[in-house]
Amino acid sequence: MIVDLRSDTVTKPTPAMHAAMMHAEVGDDVFGEDPSVTKLEGKCASLLGMDSAVFCPSGTMTNQIGIKILTTPYDEVICYKGAHIYKYEGGGLAGNSLVSVRLLNGDRGRISVDEIEPNINNTQDAHQPITSVVALENTVVREAGSFYTLDQIKKISQFARSKGLRMHLDGARLFNALTETKDKAEEYGKYFDTISICLSKGLGAPVGSVLVCKKEFESKARRMRKALGGGMRQAGFLAAAGIYALDNHIGRLKEDHARAAELGKALSKISWIRSVMPVDTNIVIFSVADSITPEQVLSKLAEQQIKAIKFGDKEIRLVTHLDFDDSMLEKTLAEFKKLSL
């Protein structure tokens, strides 16, 4: 039995999802003629209480398009110092949007009005870039899936807009956050100009993310998708997987969270593990003792057919998902308990 905990991107379509893909009605989406893509985009826009949506191959692309259409070259974006848009998207903010980034510490990645306010640049000072966007991430991948509540987001958004700033959300795992907060997804549209949601992480689709946006940004978003090479043709086969995921896989995310919580609790009792971050959703991050390295641990786990990834100098990350079941959890717990280093 191979147990793959490297990411929730490793899932494969369920038989029912595969059937939905094979029976999808398709057309040429670049010409706006793929009915399955149109249905997915409409579904996502309605779900998040916004006007429009654009289906893209990846979450990196939806994030990059979101920032691009909200900024002008030489602007500055405010975000958490470990934000995915800054740390894990290949320098795309600089390359695609020609913007600088103001990095904040946050509380486990959750930035606040108190942090944002003193970091907004003076528009009259030509030495400084113009602050134009506040970008949030929900959940925060670098901080073991910590999440914002809608109340926290409302305060940030209202303040940002009072200062003339736009709002972007990297919601790659937004539905994991909503599973815990019980907030209404459709309320999110009130507080953001662009929202990126990923279908191929916790929701288990094989490919794809959607940029949900205000109507005024849709044509710019489609143009940027084309410029970045994201214009797909008979993409309805992929869109059908996303529709199935939204209809059937959101409710089960709580199972991933429960298994992650069990992992975190067990790992906190192991002597060679120095610390475990709080487990809020489906991500477990732990640090190993000074006397050992993550590589040693990963090598030992690999011998038992358990896959994980290094996530810092002393850190290892585990992510639970659709294809990680109770039998795999039992195996993982047993192997960790036996592991001697």
Image (cartoon, rainbow, N blue to C red):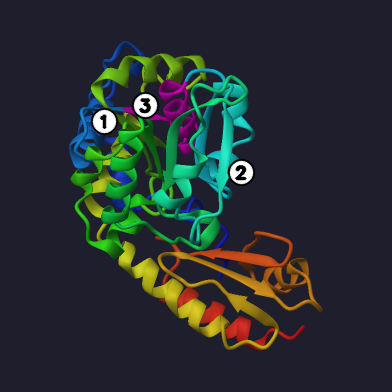
Judge whether 199 appears above or below 230 on screen: below
Q: How far apart are the two marked residues, 1 and 3, measured between alpha carbons?
A: 12 Å
Quickly name the residue at label 3. Answer: 235
Quickly name the residue at label 2. Answer: 87
Choose the circle earlier in sequence order: 2 or 1. 1
From the viewer's side, name the closer residue of 311 and 19: 311
Q: For this view, does 134 lie left or right of residue 29?
A: right
Q: Is residue 58 magenta?
A: yes
Provide the residue span drawn in magenta: 54-71
Circle 2 SS class: helix
Q: Residue furthest front?
A: 124
How packed is label 3: few (under 14 Cα within 10 Å), some, or many (20 or more)? many
Q: Nearer the viewer, mark 2 or mark 1?
A: 2
Look at 30% across and 65% down and name the residue there: 180
How packed is label 1: few (under 14 Cα within 10 Å), some, or many (20 or more)? many
Q: Is residue 173 visible?
A: yes
Judge whether 60 appears above or below 33 on screen: below
